Amino acid sequence: MKFARLSAFATALMLSSLAMAESGGDRTFDRMMSANDRAVELFVAKEKAAANPVVVNEKKAQKTQDL
């Protein structure tokens, strides 16, 4: 019985050390941040393109003022 407990404890320690490995998580986080930065750049470029000045039609503006 003591051997089973000891082996279960050793297995739990080994599995927890594998689960806490840093290299995979760091790479995933770096990839996620790179994708986020790229998405923000694309969004800003799209918003700047949409912020072009709007041409106002003078005749239409006068008609709406008459109402």
Image (cartoon, grey):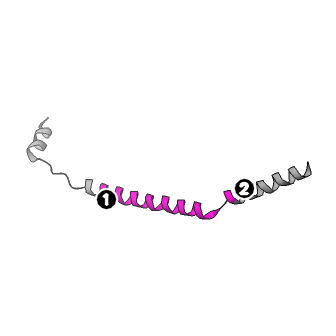
User: The residue under label 1 is which amino acid type?
Assistant: Ala
- Residue bearing mark 1: 45
Question: Helix, strand, or loop for circle 1?
Answer: helix
Q: In the picture provided, is 11 more to the left or to the right than 24?
A: right
Kindly report the distance in space between the C-alpha atoms of the residues bearing marks 2 and 1. Answer: 46 Å
Q: Quadrant of residue 6?
A: bottom right
Q: Residue at x 54, y 63 (%)?
A: 27
- Residue 9: image quadrant is bottom right
Q: Give the position of the C terminus as an image quadrant.
A: top left
Farthest residue toward the top?
Answer: 67
Query: Is label 2 in a helix, a strand or a loop?
Result: helix
Instruction: Based on the picture, tell me whether residue 24 belongs to the magenta stretch.
Output: yes
Q: Are marks 2 and 1 in contact (CB under 8 Å)?
A: no
Judging depth in this view, the residue of 15 and 52 nearest the camera is: 15
In this figure, which residue is indicated by the disc labeled 2? 15
Magenta stretch bounds: 18-47
Find residue 14 and name its label: none
User: Can you give x and y, in whole percent of width and height, for residue 13 in the image?
Assistant: 77, 57
Label 2 neighbour load within 10 Å: few <14, some 14-19, many 20+: few
Q: Position of residue 17 (x, y in %)?
A: 71, 60
Residue 26 placed where, x, y %? 57, 63
The crowding category of the residue bearing disc 1, from other C-alpha atoms within 10 Å (few below 14, some 14 to 19, many at least 20), is: few
Label 2 sits on what residue type? Leu
**What residue sits 10% from the left and 47% below the top?**
58
Q: Could you tell me which residue is drawn at 37 percent across and 60 percent down?
A: 41
Give the mark, 2 or 1, whose residue is nearer the N terminus: 2
